[in-house]
Image (spheres, coloured by chain):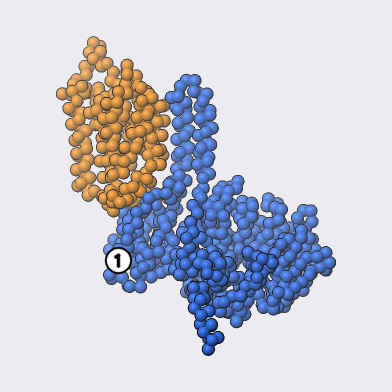
Chain colours: A blue, B orange
Amino acid sequence: MRSTLVLVLIALFLVPFASASLTVPGGYVSTSPLVVDDHVLIRSSGTFDGTSPPMVRAYAEGGAVKWVIEGKATMQPDMADLVLMPAGSSACGTWPEQVIIAWSSGLLEARSPDEGLPLWQVNTTVQGWGLTATPVVVEEGLLITTRGGVELRCPSNGTLLHAAETGLGWRNPGTMINGTVHVGDETGRLWSWTPGEPPSFIELEGAIRHAPLAINGGLLVHLQTQRSSMVQWLPLDEGQHPTPSSQAHRLTSGASPGMPVALNGTTAVVADASGVYVLQWTEGGWDATRLSTAPVQGPLRFEGGWLTGSVNAPEGGFFAFAMTSESADVAFGADLRGYGTAPPVLCGEGWLLVKDAGHVVVDVQSNDSSCPLVSSPALEVAQESVDKSPIVWTLALMTAFLAGSTAFYRRGLLSALRWSSPFLLIALVALMPALMGLWADQAPQSEGEPVWDEAWPEAWRGGQVVVFELPNETLAFGGFEPRPTPLEATMVAADSLGLSVSLEDHALGTWVTAINGTTLDGWVYEVNNVRPMIGADAYALPSSSVLVWRLA
Amino acid sequence: MFASVGVHGPVLSPAAALALDVVLLGAATLLLLSDKRMTRHHGVLLLSFVAVVAVLRVLMANLPNVQPVTVAVLLAGATLGARRGVAFAILVTMLSNAVLGDGYWTLFQAVGWALVAVTGAHAHLIQDEGLLLGRATLLAGLLALPFGFITNLSLLGGGVGFAELPALMWMGLPFDLSHALGNTVIMLWTGSLMVRMLTPVNVPDALEMPGVEADVHLT
């Protein structure tokens, strides 16, 4: 009786720590969620029957969907991790904090993490399918592994800086060491490429489906062969090219290897169907320690001192082994089991657990509510940095010319102004598109209330509704998952209603020029009865809103 | 990324558009005829200048809000007086909008430039038949802001209400800046030339020349 009472009290005590859960619809969830400020981004791969496209959803407090973007359905599931790239700058430009999304359709795009607004999009080469490898942020830019090559792109706008052709690959990100990129392919070739130079390779046996790890001045690869796998360490020569591994640094392993992770410069963790192993590099070979017998076929993750992974089995759970003395192994309270490859990720003081079937659980480890899915965190949203380069250029032009015009200063201030003003005007005109982008972001936006039509289904209430006021009829569509921009919501609604939408890309944004073939004087949109002063591809559409398109 | 396509004020019916044009043209004609100092020579000079400035406006339409009209109107007001300056403003607006697009906004542009002309007439920009360039440049730059405000008012109605006005003004500020800077450049480089072109020639001398018809007062 007393023990029952104790159990009840413990249960009551744990109620505040109870884990939050949700189910992501529309296909497998094979990649780890990405925690960004006050929401969590989760990618789903789409369904094989084509009923649901691949998507990225932003979940907020209580599992509310903040926004959704969708990709083009392909024969290849979308399994590249979402990458949060911090704001920065390089010779090719500056960029704000952005989420990099690689799609199997070949589309590579950057979006603002908070609102999901597109920052830039580029198409990459497709050979059967497009991007399956997680983009890698390196000092030189964004390292992208395409189906048959590797590219270095500018994080500011996605521009291609350098590219090289390699062999056909799958889920094979590159690794950059001392300016040289190393990437494997399906035939076992380990390519080395210094941007600007032709690539070279060393032939190995088995498929390489992970980013090579930098271990002790060499590369660790876990090669997948038909019934087993092989871990090899290949020392790098002076030219940063891998050389054949010694017999001592080859280790035969189990079938279906996962994606290894480096713990430090000499230690890596590999996994396969037979378990998880810590490999310590020594002169005489590998010092191997088995951490677990659970099969792991997906990526391993090393975060906050914990090694995490998902057990890929019918009753498979998760693990989070403490790899430092400061922390202890994690015992997950949530009973989430099944096939899956996405490792748990830290979310506040809890862990986000995901399985292939789309079940997501926040395993709360303490009385902490900083994980966005559990409750609303009182976090200050960092001010989004903006691309200041055009302004810098213009200021530089101004300064340069004003310095030049001081020569005219002897003839008076008016003369200096006379000679400098044309150049200032040229600079302003050249800067206008960029300036308008910045300006539009700061524009005061009046927000109205959704205007509800009683004829609409009740299920649409509280969500986004798109209304097309065509010349002869008015069509409405709602009940879909919220989209980040009016343009994306419009495309979803138009697709569902069978309407065509013509778009034109201009330097200042995307314009809707015709809906269902009707052009006339153009189309304008209103959100909750208020007409935004920025384009439909740049306005942050509230998750509960009525978007109306009508002729100008 | 502003939505410039389709953002405009109320759409006028053909009859209303015609009425607006008639009213504006009538106002310009009345202003010219009521000016006692107006001669045929002045009329020809004025209309020629209207044509030149209208063509310039059309040619510079691709530059964001760089408006040669503002400077020309300001100087027309300064040299020819308020009445002819306002008539000049109305005629340039109508003529250039015949190419760039006529509508409800023509009224606001005409009013905006008419106020610029009136300002020019009262700002003492001419001294000893010469242009006070510094003062004229400053005024040309500053007048871009009230002109922008007046023309933005034309967007009210037709789906844009007072609630959107602050955002509208905000979005227009870079263009007002461009307008101001354009005015500065145009005034500094062509202001004196424009004044010389607009200043009436001492035509009565022609009476003394055999074979040259004397200028005739219109009234």
x then y, percent, for residue A21: 50, 74
- Give the side of residue B30 with respect to residue A249, left or right: left
Q: Residue at x 40, y 60 (%)?
A: A541
Which image quarter: residue A213? bottom right
Which image quarter: residue A124? bottom right
Instruction: Indicate the secondary structure of the residue bearing disc 1.
Output: loop
Residue A108 in sight here? no
Give the residue furthest to the left: B219
Residue B17 in sight here? yes
Q: Residue at x 17, y 27 (%)?
A: B34
- In front of the other: A53 or A36: A36
Dot 1: chain letter: A
- In front of the other: A82 or A104: A82
x then y, percent, for residue A207: 70, 69
Residue under circle 1?
Answer: A452
**Kind of residue indicated by mark 1:** Trp
Q: Residue at x 35, y 33 (%)?
A: B142
Give the residue furthest to the front: A2
x then y, percent, for residue A16: 49, 73
Residue B211 to residue B78: above or below: above
Residue A74 to residue A156: above or below: below
x then y, percent, for residue A196: 68, 50
- In front of the other: A278 or A380: A380
